Amino acid sequence: MFPSARPLTVPMKADSVLSPRLAFGHLPLFPDDEDYPPNAIYFSLLPDEGGLGRVTFEDLDAVRGSRGEHLPYPRNVPLTAPVATREWVFEVTDSPWLAERDAYENHHYRTPLLDTHQHYLFSFHDQFVEAIARGIWFDKPDPDKPLVPSPAHPLAPFSQADPAETYRSPSGVPWELRRSSKDEATLIRDSRLCSQRLYQFNLVLDGESREAASVWLRTSRGRTYSRMTRNWVGELTRRDGLAEYDDFLDEWERYTAEVADRRRSIGKPLE
């Protein structure tokens, strides 16, 4: 099989003449950049819209830029298919670069990429940016603070100000549940580009409520699924389709039982 570029439908159009700026790495350049400015592509929007657009990445593995006016891979659509608007974002299928990165990650970290990540291609006037990532997201950065992550980003944690349901696990640990405010149709639509946080599970310990696990919705390669992750651990389990929070309660309660046992062993209260 040979690599080819399949056009993606995205919510923004980049200016067809102006060049992008690729921001990679987390070194803050200004005091208001916060600690971790996002890896991103910044681009000028069409003249009638004006301003800057931004592409950020979910679980970015690799990124590269190059010059050129012609797609580096053939378009993966029938030659007779009409092009209504300028295509500028593509998924590269049968990508040798993705296979190379998968082999590297598997060998050194036992982290496969082929089933979770895509090879994305962004085409500008005479430049290309390519990325290996789990997903991509489009937004407009704050013009005064363009390197600051958006609080409305689907990967951002739910705010403590969002409504929360309070529970206590059988092991005695108090916890909170927060739900996405997006409707089902919007969640599924948006999950075609980037994982959408469905539910956030917070432990309430030592007088603080902190995220401990979340459930995400993703639609990729024609399949929609929900997966539970924990900070610093990664994916715990997944379900097909748009799941309910209680589909993951057994996994969550196993974890809260571990937390309870650990706190009792060091003499800490379950509050």
Image (cartoon, rainbow, N blue to C red):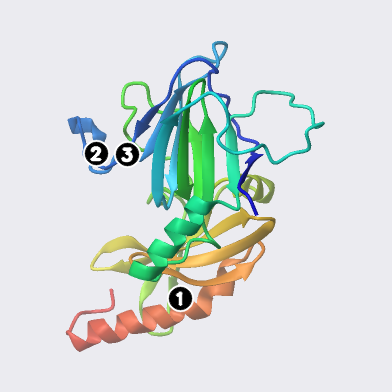
Residue 13 relative to residue 172: left or right? right
Amino acid bearing label 1: Trp
Quadrant in which the C terminus appears: bottom left
Amino acid bearing label 3: Phe
Q: Residue 34, labelled with which disc?
A: 2
Q: Secondary structure at mark 1?
A: helix
Mark 3 surroundings: few (<14), some (14-19) or many (≥20) residues within 10 A: some
Q: CA distance from mark 3 to mark 2?
A: 15 Å
The residue lying toward the viewer, choosing from 263 and 35, is 35
- Nearest to viewer (mark 3 / mark 2): 3
- Nearest to viewer (mark 1 / mark 2): 2
Vertical order, 152 against 219 (above or below): above
Q: Secondary structure at mark 2?
A: loop
Residue 259, by quadrant, is bottom left
Residue 137 in view (yes/no):
yes
First in residue order: circle 1 vs circle 2: 2
Q: Residue 216, labelled with which disc?
A: none
Mark 1 surroundings: few (<14), some (14-19) or many (≥20) residues within 10 A: many
Q: CA distance from mark 1 to mark 2?
A: 31 Å
Q: Residue 24, labelled with which disc?
A: 3
The residue lying toward the viewer, choosing from 76 and 223, is 76
Vertical order, 134 against 29 (above or below): below
**Labels 1 & 2 near each other (Cβ < 8 A):** no
- Provide the residue designation for mark 1: 252
Residue 150 in view (yes/no):
no
- Nearest to viewer (mark 3 / mark 1): 3
The residue lying toward the viewer, choosing from 39 and 172, is 39
Amino acid bearing label 2: Glu
Q: Where residue 246 appears, x then y in whole percent?
A: 57, 72
Q: Where residue 209 appears, x then y in whole percent?
A: 32, 61
